[in-house]
């Protein structure tokens, strides 16, 4: 995931034990937040809502 952000020009934090399933992000300027948000949406596209089937 870190490499995917880097390929989009966004540097995110290193792995942060013991929370290895989390990502640490620090944002400074509004332009940096915009760049991060755009990259995040490209890397993690919105999933279609799942409907629950009841039987």
Image: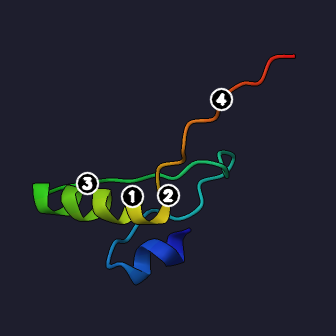
Q: CA distance from mark 2 to mark 1?
A: 5 Å
The mark that comes first in sequence, 3 or 1, is 3
Residue position for label 1: 41
Q: Residue at x 54, y 44 (%)?
A: 48
Residue 32: mark: none
SS at badge 3: loop
Instruction: Judge depth for marks 3 and 1 and give the one in front.
Output: 1
Q: Residue at x 52, y 52 (%)?
A: 23
Q: Is residue 51 above or below residue 38?
A: above
- The percent position of residue 10, horizontal first and vertical second, equals 34, 72
**Labels 4 & 3 near each other (Cβ < 8 A):** no
Q: CA distance from mark 4 to mark 1?
A: 22 Å
SS at badge 2: loop
- The percent position of residue 13, horizontal first and vertical second, equals 46, 62
Residue position for label 2: 44
Residue position for label 3: 27
The mark that comes first in sequence, 2 or 3, is 3
The mark that comes first in sequence, 4 or 1, is 1
Q: Nearer the viewer, residue 26 or 6?
A: 6
Q: Is residue 21 left or right of 13 when viewed as pictured?
A: right
Mark 3 neighbour class, 10 Å CA radius: few under 14, some 14 to 19, many 20 or more: few
The mark that comes first in sequence, 4 or 3, is 3
Q: Residue at x 29, y 62 (%)?
A: 38
Instruction: Judge depth for marks 2 and 3 and give the one in front.
Output: 2
Residue position for label 4: 51
SS at badge 4: loop
Q: How many marks?
A: 4
Q: Nearer the viewer, residue 7 or 45?
A: 45
Answer with the quarter of the image where residue 53 lies: top right
Q: Is residue 42 above or below residue 49?
A: below
**Labels 2 & 1 near each other (Cβ < 8 A):** yes
């Amino acid at each position: 995931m870190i490499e995917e952000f880097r390929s989009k020009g966004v540097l995110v934090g290193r792995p942060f034990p013991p929370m290895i399933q989390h990502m640490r992000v620090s944002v400074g300027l509004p332009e940096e937040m915009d760049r991060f948000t755009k990259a995040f949406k490209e890397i993690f596209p919105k999933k279609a809502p799942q409907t629950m089937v009841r039987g």
